[in-house]
Amino acid sequence: MIGAIIFSLISLDNCRPRKPEAVPPARVEVKYLGFHALVEGKKAAEELIKEIPRLAARGVNLLFVEVDYNFEYRSHPELRGPEPVTVAQAKSLVRLCREYRIRLIPEFQSFGHQSWEKKTFSLLTVYPQFDETPGKYPGNQGIYCRSWCPLHPELPPIINDLYDELLETFEADGLHVGMDEVFIIADPDCPRCHGKDPAELFAHAVQTAYDHIVRKRGKEMFMWGDRLLDGKATGYGEWEASMNGTHPAIDLIPRDIVICDWHYEIMPGGVYPSIPLFIEKGFRVLPTSFRNKKAAEALIDYSLQFSTDRMLGHLCTTWQPPEAGKTYKHPPLVLASRRLRGSG
Ligand SMILES: [Zn+2]
């Protein structure tokens, strides 16, 4: 999603959205005011722990803690990032979230986002054979982020160990698996994926995670929604939606996955066609905003017109490490709190 900020290449020309017909009530009761925290290490976790009471006072009742490889994994210590979040910190988060009645969901970025700029994350440095494009793009030049190979047979047992450890340590009843902005998929040089349909490959990756998290472990699964949307038909373009052939996967994956539908720009007419689309397809949707307050306002106002139990509320992100005494003042969060909770 950071890429959306850097490149901001949304094409508005193809947007032919419909306004919803329902007249909005003054305030719709929604299930969640969510907050997504990027916690890339011990320091960020410390700051987040201090901020929990203030986030709760804002009305936050769902917290995604994205740790990715930056956790003190015991099952695969070789995959720990530097200065990882400790088990003790995770337990502090569990205790505080319980005290303040916040649902705590760990997040692990799956499939895409296996590198950032020149840095390749631990999975693909420790196990380069899982790279969709091993040996290609030295220094990550010319690409956005690396992907893992969704068809490598030795990969799921390792990732499932990490998922399990997060679920257990965070005592969570759900897991967010990321899966946004997958641009490297069905690479022509991958011996397993070349020539395959990107939508089927993407759906396979989603199903692999689902089979473990939902079917085996009985937990709820959350994911970002961009790869399930047709970038051209929706007018969202290639970041907030897909222009690389993955979007038909929307009809191939289980409907009980919660879709975090992120949109950071103002759409023409304030219309976000993905919200009714996900709802009509049978998914529950959690519209997600970033730092543009006007865009957040447009997204919140539009989504609140859908008084259905499939429209879960709103999720705020900051895409920077939490800062005690500051994060709770994130302007779109203050705004969302006023709109959803009548407070803030
Ligand atoms: Zn592959």
Image (cartoon, rainbow, N blue to C red):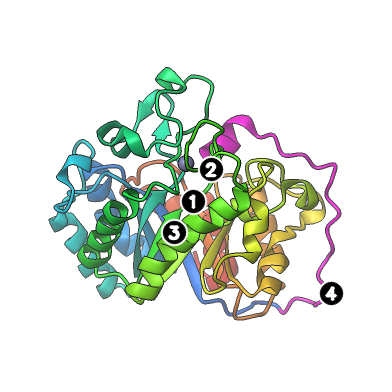
Give the side of residue 328 with respect to residue 196, left or right.
left
Toward the front, the furthest residue is 191
| Mark 2 vs mark 3: in front | 2
- How far apart, in angstroms, are the residues tagged by discs 1 and 3? 18 Å
- Residue located at (83% from left, 58% from top): 17
What amino acid is at disc 3?
A: Phe
In the structure shown, which secondary structural element does the residue marked by tag 2 occupy?
A: loop
**Residue 93 is inside the magenta segment:** no
What amino acid is at disc 2?
A: Val
Q: In this view, does 42 lie above or below 175?
A: above
Q: Do the residues labelled 1 and 2 touch (CB within 8 Å)?
A: yes
Query: Residue 35's mark?
Result: 3
What amino acid is at disc 4?
A: Glu
Sequence-wise, the earlier of marks 1 and 4 is 4
Residue 168, quarter of picture: bottom left
Query: Residue 21's mark?
Result: 4
Q: Can residue 304 be seen in this view?
A: no
Q: Is the magenta stretch mostly helix, strand or loop?
A: loop
In the structure shown, which secondary structural element does the residue marked by tag 3 occupy?
A: strand
Q: Give the range drawn in magenta.
A: 1-25
Query: Residue 179's mark?
Result: 1
Sequence-wise, the earlier of marks 1 and 3 is 3
